[in-house]
Amino acid sequence: MPDPTPSASSARPEAIRISDLHKSFGSLEVLKGVSLTARQGDVVAIIGGSGSGKSTMLRCINFLETPKSGEIVIGGETVEMRADGSPANRKQIERIRTRLAMVFQQFNLWTHRTLLENVIEVPVHVLKMPRDQAVARAHELLARVGLGDKADAFPAFLSGGQQQRAAIARALAVDPSVMLFDEPTSALDPELVGEVLTVIRDLAAEGRTMLLVTHEMKFAREVADHVVYLFEGRIEEQGPPAEVFGNPKSERLKQFLRSVA
Amino acid sequence: MTNVLELLGLAESAELLALSPPGWGGNLLRGLLNSLQIAFGAFGMGLIIGLFGAYGKLYGGPVLRDLLAIYTTVIRAVPELVLILILYYVGTDLINKAATAMGYDRVEISGIVAGIWVLGIVQGAYATEVLRGAIKAVPPGQIEAARAYGMPAFMTMRRVTIPAMMSFATPGLANLWLIATKDTALLAIVGFAELTLETRQAASSTRAYFTFFLAAGALYLLVTLFSGLIFGWIERWARRGQPSLKGGQP
Ligand SMILES: Nc1ncnc2c1ncn2[C@@H]1O[C@H](COP(=O)(O)OP(=O)(O)OP(=O)(O)O)[C@@H](O)[C@H]1O
Ligand SMILES: [Mg+2]
């Protein structure tokens, strides 16, 4: 399989590789053989129409959805799968999940915990980090996303933009090797989108590896190293943002870009 | 004090309710303590059964789900008094049969333990439904986030699902607790010395029915009021992080 990422980056180790991923919901085939590689530091933007399988692809990577078949390699470690695609080794899945960090469209913060408690939850209880160390780091991360003064606030009392920034702090707290963003700004009021994009832009600039499903085409063009266009469960076209957005080849992508412009 | 009571014509009642014999107050309080012990045990057992039952109903296989459906339906359909008679006599009978079969003597089953079991099984059926509803009310995204960050199933339940469902479950559980305290009175029928039975004995020995049943009623009322206080506190704690229904900061 040819490496779809730009050759300039091929020296860096692979962070994530998906090969020939298939997924169905009942008789509905949602992913029809998707392959994708991201090297460390890559920002891969995934675009496509509603229902094209973007979320499903992201959710198969950490096995929130069970794929039907295919191969998933995270940081050189192949996820053990049974013949039916289900994970064969629960412990391995749980361990791999702690190296991936997902940021959800609906934030999904734990509402009965303060922001600080949300951020230390996984480091303390899953990764068994000493509590004071986790707390110190959580304060740093909250300050970094501009929520230094909200550590003791509960999520429900914050704006969507603040909640999503807190969710990003929670993701950073596990020091993930790959971050998975599923439309992180789609649930936000327009005036709150910018503050979240700013945080993500900073993360991209510092060399975080991320897979970013987004409808913000301008933003994708700006931060991504590589853009993937999904159409009905297949990768219809991919390449560097300048190519994909500036000189699209497939008719469907052209049409899609016109429709979102 | 004595004068005031005399004046009100309550001196006799006060004497009857005195804590030490010949007064019956001590017996009433002992009965109350027994009632509370059973209610507490049954409520706790109900919670444990309810948690397993709720998880079983939500995530269990078809056989387990059917069994649980039978359990909750039957228990909630049959009057508690009948259940208590059935469970008490059948239960003790079964235990004794098992004991003799294994070569032991007939065992004397402690009233408290039997009471806790019988009422616990009844409470478990109701708690299953209360907790099942509460778990279903937890936004699925919060459980999904726990999974996405590598939490094992049991930790997810302990750290996310249970604390998140508490605010939905407390009103129902508070009701169950009050029902538990009052259901202990039904155990009088199998001769267990809880508050109601003690009251009846005191009343029939002294013919002072009004005094004793009024006193017992007052004790039940006190328990209810005190429970209300405790559950109010628990509910406020469980609802931390949720905007108050009245609006504004908590
Ligand atoms: N749990 C599910 N059960 C059944 N069908 C599902 C499920 N999740 C997704 N689908 C279907 O799979 C298809 C792809 O869904 P997916 O959420 O991956 O699309 P998407 O590209 O993320 O779309 P959007 O831009 O609207 O978020 C859709 O047709 C959707 O209806
Ligand atoms: Mg989606």
Image (spheres, rainbow, N blue to C red):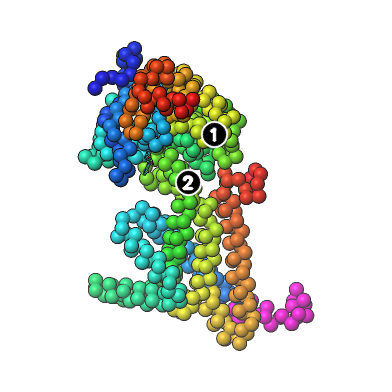
Residue in the image at 24% along x and 74% along y: B101
**At which x and y percent is residue A221?**
45, 20
What chain does mark 1 sit on? A
Residue receiving disc 1: A188
Q: Is residue A229 left or right of residue B137?
A: left
Q: Residues within 10 Å of mark 1 (few under 14, many from 20)?
A: some
Q: Amino acid at mark 1?
A: Leu
A201 is higher (above) or lower (below) than A168: above
**Do we see residue B124 in this rendering?**
yes
Rendered-image quadrant of the N terminus of chain A: top left
Which region is colored magenta? B1-24
**At which x and y percent is residue A21?**
28, 33
**At which x and y percent is residue B48?**
42, 58
Residue in the image at 60% along x and 86% along y: B206
A28 is higher (above) or lower (below) than A215: below
What chain does mark 2 sit on? B
Q: Amino acid at mark 2?
A: Pro
Q: Is residue B46 left or right of residue A198?
A: left
